[in-house]
Amino acid sequence: MHVSDTHWEVSLEISFPNIDWTTLQSAYGWAALQYQTWARGSIFIDGNLPQRILFHTDNVMEYAIDGDRVFGGDMYGFHRAPLIMSLEPGYHSIDLRLIRDVRAMGGVGAPSIQATLELRTVPEELSAVGGTVLVSDVVDGHLASQYGSIAVCNQCTNWIELLGFGSDVSAYPLSFSIVSS
């Protein structure tokens, strides 16, 4: 487990080393290597004020926070679809639905599930998603096109209207500014 004041991360591995998977697979085929399970844990939010939390659930099928189910964990571990939530101080239960799928995870060796949960406090209301900037080439210090794309994440409780973004082509790598209201 990794812990800091603004970042918590825990990795889980579910495996059953005392099961004869080879015999089960010879009798039942690849279906013997598939299963699902639930895991339960909790998180404690310290202090007197609610915390805005960004919650990544890599290799989790679905989950529930304090009994409220969220369908759509990050089953394939792309790390691109976090839940952004506000948690009151105190303990909060986390229930995870984990699955072992042969088609997605392979059918070789003992079947296990590796999942990672990452919680970060939200430092800002709007952030650019790393690695998503898409712009044209730079020619003689100028962008070849006026169009570009960048994925942003609204991490506040209100709607945000994006009015535009600009770039500094003299900086390397390119630096961007986002203008919102």
Image (cartoon, helix red, strand yellow):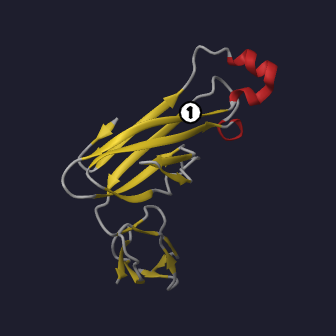
Q: Residue at x 50, y 38 (%)?
A: 115
Position of residue 164 measured from the top left corner of the image (x, y, whole percent): 42, 84
For this orientation, the residue located farthest to the left is 48
Q: Vertically, is 41 above or below 14?
A: below
Position of residue 35 measured from the top left corner of the image (x, y, whole percent): 65, 32
Label 1: few (<14), some (14–19) or many (≥20) C-alpha neighbours in 10 Å: some
Q: Nearer the viewer, residue 142 or 1?
A: 1
Quarter of the rendering containing residue 26? top right
For this orientation, the residue located farthest to the front is 67
Q: Nearer the viewer, residue 174 or 3?
A: 3
Q: Residue at x 56, y 53 (%)?
A: 71
Position of residue 87 measured from the top left corner of the image (x, y, whole percent): 32, 55
> Where, quadrant-wise, is the N terminus in this rendering?
top left
Left or right of 137 in this view: 51: left
Position of residue 123 measured from the top left corner of the image (x, y, whole percent): 28, 62
Q: Residue at x 52, y 83 (%)?
A: 147
Tag 1's secondary structure?
A: strand
Q: Vertically, is 106 above or below 62?
A: above
- Residue annotated with mark 1: 113
Quarter of the rendering containing residue 16? top right
> Where, quadrant-wise, is the C terminus in this rendering?
bottom left
Q: Residue at x 74, y 15 (%)?
A: 23
Quarter of the rendering containing residue 178? bottom left
What amino acid is labelled 1 in the image?
Ile
Total number of numbered discs in the rendering: 1
Q: Vertically, is 125 above or below 179?
A: above
